[in-house]
Image (spheres, rainbow, N blue to C red):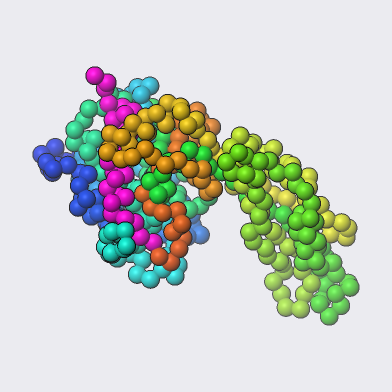
Amino acid sequence: MRADPTIPAPPSDNLPPEGFLRESSLVSWLQRFVRHPSEQSNLHENDPAIARFIRECAAPLLREIGADCRYDKMGNLIVEAGPASEASLLFVAYAMTHPAAKMPDPFSATVIETPRGPAVRGRGVAEQKTALAALFGALAETLRKPRISGRLTVVLLTAGETGRHDAVATVMPELECKPRFAVVCIGTDNRIAIGNKGRIDFEVIVKGKTSHSSAPWHGVNAIVGAQRLLQSMNDSKLDLPVHPKFGSATLTPTAIESAPKATHTVPDTVQITFDRRLLPGEDPQVAYNAIRKAITVEAPWTVECRLGPVMYPNEVSNDGPLMTKLRAAFADAGQPPPELFYCNFALDAGYLARLGIEAVMLGPGEVDQFHSNEESVLISDLTKMGHVYYRIIEQCLAPKS
């Protein structure tokens, strides 16, 4: 197993005897993560703040718990423990959070009282960072009492908010052992997302002819062409597929921009960005081709299309091998049977599924708080998921008596 030589593992007698799944340990680690900002920027996965969070905040904690780690060429962090085996489990966690935006005091990670109990408040606790703290607790406890007979892999990706698979696609070829199962650690209200939509982004460019706005008849206004295109798409029946749980697929314009940016000028270009959500079983290229055929605009305008980032949909069997182990893990952790749901947002479970890895999304944090100006997570949800993650490791990798 390769390790980063700059991060030596401490001697085992440095590990606390009481274990790492105690509330005090998990809350302290979550506060540590929140107080080290790692916000999304226009540099995306290449933002130095993301790299600093991984190398200066997460990696030192791994050293404290006795884990070796290394990095791929994108800066994603990799931890591998246990022997290479067909019994193999991957946890995927994320370093990047939504920007602080208008959230007051986003990085103090204070403990607050809520009607449902004490909670930690701060940017990223509903999405990425609480799941990361719970995962580190489960990893630490596994390393403290090594019983696993298969390969446990934990990756901390530079992604989290960019809406593409670049980071996970970079890290997967670097793993020494292909996982059989995977858990994507993101806030799901401690429910199991057994299915999620995918997504294609694409741009539609409507072209006209520029002129001075004092004589608009000399030009072809691209804004008018874009207006007609949007209206025709709204009026037409696009024959979008339907899923028994998700319902119909969706097609949504999400941004529009005209050019040139000049005063008193009829624009000759309008760019519209569309979001087409993919249902489980859909092929992204087939979905894009079908929409592309439906995008037309009459003369004198012309139209072009460009496919952007793709994220794949996912769905696992409710009674398949992974779900059987997850239900047992919840029971072993003293929790009631897990609630299952189908998730509208996309992450990396679909990419893993395309590699033949059975994957779900699961973690503490409320989906409804994503990107909001108030983000907090119940401490009880954090501790519950730390125990559940640990039991998932045991169910998938511990030797059976």
Give the residue drawn at x 41%, y 68%.
103
Q: Is residue 5 visible?
A: no
Q: Is residue 67 left or right of residue 159?
A: left
Q: Among all residues in the image, which is located at the extreme top?
A: 401
What's the residue at 46%, 28% (across, down)? 319
Is 383 on the left-hand or right-hand side of 316? left
In the rendered image, the quadrant that contains the C terminus is top left
| Residue 274 percent across, percent down from the top left | 66, 54
At horizontal 68% and vertical 65% (from top left) the residue drawn is: 257
The reply to whether residue 295 is in sight is yes
Residue 5 magenta: no
Q: Main secondary structure of the magenta part?
A: helix
- Taking the spot 43% from the left edge, 45% from the top edge, the residue there is 74
Quadrant into which the N terminus falls: top left
Against 71, residue 129 (above or below) is: below
Q: Is residue 211 above or below residue 30?
A: below
Tell me, yes or no, whether the highlighted magenta stretch contains residue 379: yes
Q: Is residue 121 left or right of residue 7?
A: right
Tag count: 0
Q: Nearer the viewer, residue 115 or 195?
A: 115
User: Residue 91 occupies which quadrant of the picture?
Assistant: top left
- Comparing 378 with 49, the one in front is 378
Residue 183 position in % (x across, y down): 40, 38
Report x, y in % for residue 288.
69, 43
Q: Magenta segment range?
A: 375-401
In the image, 167 versus 290, the foreground residue is: 290
Q: Nearer the viewer, residue 126 or 41?
A: 126
